[in-house]
Each structure stands twice: as structure tokens, then as C-alpha cells.
Amino acid sequence: MLEHFYFSETRVEIKESVRGQDIFIIQTIPRDVNTAVMELLIMAYALKTSCARNIIGVIPYFPYSKQSKMRKRGSIVCKLLASMLAKAGLTHIITMDLHQKEIQGFFSFPVDNLRASPFLLQYIQEEIPNYRNAVIVAKSPDAAKRAQSYAERLRLGLAVIHGEAQCTELDMDDGRHSPPMVKNATVHPGLELPLMMAKEKPPITVVGDVGGRIAIIVDDIIDDVESFVAAAEILKERGAYKIYVMATHGILSAEAPRLIEESSVDEVVVTNTVPHEVQKLQCPKIKTVDISLILSEAIRRIHNGESMAYLFRNITVDD
């Protein structure tokens, strides 16, 4: 039983014996991320103190996965969350399409990072008319590997958007200006370090031919959609006659449904790793691909002690 009381505190009570059992906690992440995380931690700790044998968290979208690198004087919150889950008692996690695959190294217990790409590839083949006339698009060089994987599997062309309109995670300061740089700072005599040249992005360019083609933009997360809308406008200018956006996690926060509805994007396809029923009511362009089948099969295999290799057939590092 889970309830909230006293200034929104969370209380969990296990109503039956779980001693020596395998327990699966299925926790989707709604708008209130911090509440969902605390519920998961408290449930896991309650099961641990109730002597459950294994506590497996099924977390389709792993929260804070974008905060997996040092930014300025911030912190690597994703690693903190991994440590908290281990301390609370989790022994295994099933998730899908981590934002950075290196996040698996933050955990001290097994993590099965499932892939949604087979479901999205199937959607392209079955639901997009004349998909053979499509080209897979990366909206920034950072997404090029994922786009290349889609293009190779579908035997389609590849295009990459590059230029000054893009602002990628790699361009942000990594926090190593410490102490902060100040004017007229004293330098140790004889110490002359080479100065890193500032980046200057070229004018925006689409590398690849999209004229008279269907453009399919692929990524792992759709949150704030401004960059996707801007990419769609560029592709429209370059001659693409239909534009799809596909991603695993449809967070679709803030004004995302309205911006999509008013944009050149014809359809946004996401999986149901994150609840987005309200956004679908606001924007009929949003479509959902169900991935519950692979999650249920993963749960069955772990519970029965079977190999998980079947779920990773033909999956490569870039998928």
C-alpha cells in the first residue's frame, strides 16, 4: 500500500509476506519526477527490510539520465540516483534506451538496457506509406550514430543537420574552469599553457539529399521540441515533402503539443515508456508505439533465470 500524508510525505506498507521472493517494482516516471523517485526508493527499502530475495526495478525511462556528465559546478545526478537505488535495496534494473549507455557503469548491480528501435523500425515499415522513398535524419551530429543505425537497417539514405542553429550537450562547459577565470590573473612565471580556440559553428547545412523525400528524424528523447521544429522547417526548405519525428521517450513537456501541432512536422511517434495521454489529446499528430511486450518478456526471463540474449539479437552498441 502506498499513500501520501503529512506535507506530501510518502508511506509504504507491504500487506503480505515477500520473504525469499523475487519482487518487480514497475515505476513509470510521470511529470512529478522527484515524487516518483522517492516512491521507488521507499518501496525498495520496505521490500528489503521485509526480506525479499531480489528486488528488480522496471523503469522504462530512467530519470535524470541527461545529467550524466559534469556541468560547470553542478553534479552527476544520475550517478547519485544509481547509488541511492543500490542503497535502498534494488538488486537489478530493467530500463530502455538510456540517454548515454555509459550510465550502466554507475550501477553496482546488473542493468538490462533494452532497445525500442525494433518496434520503431517496424512502425516505419508498416505505417509509413512509401517508406522506401525516405531518408533518415539526425538533427545534430550527436545523433548521427543512431540515425546511421536506422538507415543501415532499413537500407535508406542518411542526412545530418549541422550548423550554428544547433546547440549540443558537448558544447557546454564541463566545469573545469575552477577557480574561475578572472582578468589580470597572476600566472606562475614560466608557465605558458596553450589557449583553447573558441568554437565557431559553420552556417546551417543539411549533409545529404532530402529533396522530394520523406524525412524521418530519429532521437532517443523528445522533451522541449523547439530543436525538432527548427529541424523540420530546414528540411521543408530543402524539399522534404513529409516529415516524421521518432523517439523512444516522449516527455513532451511545456508547450510541446501546441508547437508540434503548429509546425511542419506531420507525425511524432514515441513509445509508451512515459505516460503522454494528455499530450495526445492536445495534439493528434502524436502517435504511440507499445513496447510492453519486451518488458513483460524481460520480467519473465529474469524471474525464470533464463538468458536475456534473445532480447538483444542483432543489437549493436550504436542502437
Image (spheres, rainbow, N blue to C red):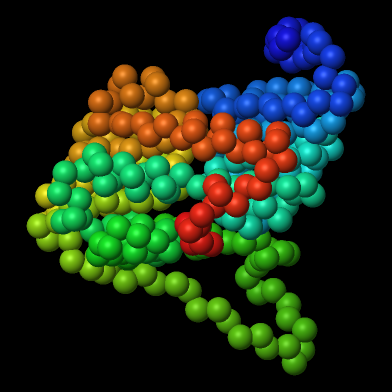
In this rendering, position of residue 271 left or right of residue 310? left
In this rendering, position of residue 243 left or right of residue 182? left
Q: Quadrant of residue 69?
A: bottom right
Q: Nearer the viewer, residue 224 or 186?
A: 224
Counting the numbered discs, the total is 0
The percent coordinates of residue 114 (x first, y second) are: 55, 46
Whether residue 66 is visible, yes or no, is no
Q: Look at the picture and state if 66 lies above or below 299.
A: below
In this rendering, position of residue 235 left or right of residue 56? left
Please name the residue shown 48% across and 58% down the image.
314
Please name the residue shown 31% across and 31% down the image.
287
Q: Quadrant of residue 138?
A: bottom left
The percent coordinates of residue 254 (x first, y second) are: 41, 30
Q: Look at the picture and state if 301 lies above or below 138.
A: above
The percent coordinates of residue 284 (x first, y second) are: 25, 26
Please name the residue shown 54% across and 47% down the image.
311
The percent coordinates of residue 224 (x first, y second) are: 41, 40
**Quadrant for the N terminus in the image:** top right
Please name the residue shown 56% across and 31% down the image.
296
Q: Look at the picture and state if 82 lies above or below 141.
A: above
Whether residue 85 is visible, yes or no, is yes
Q: Nearer the viewer, residue 145 or 55?
A: 55
Q: Nearer the viewer, residue 36 or 213?
A: 213
Q: Quadrant of residue 128?
A: top left
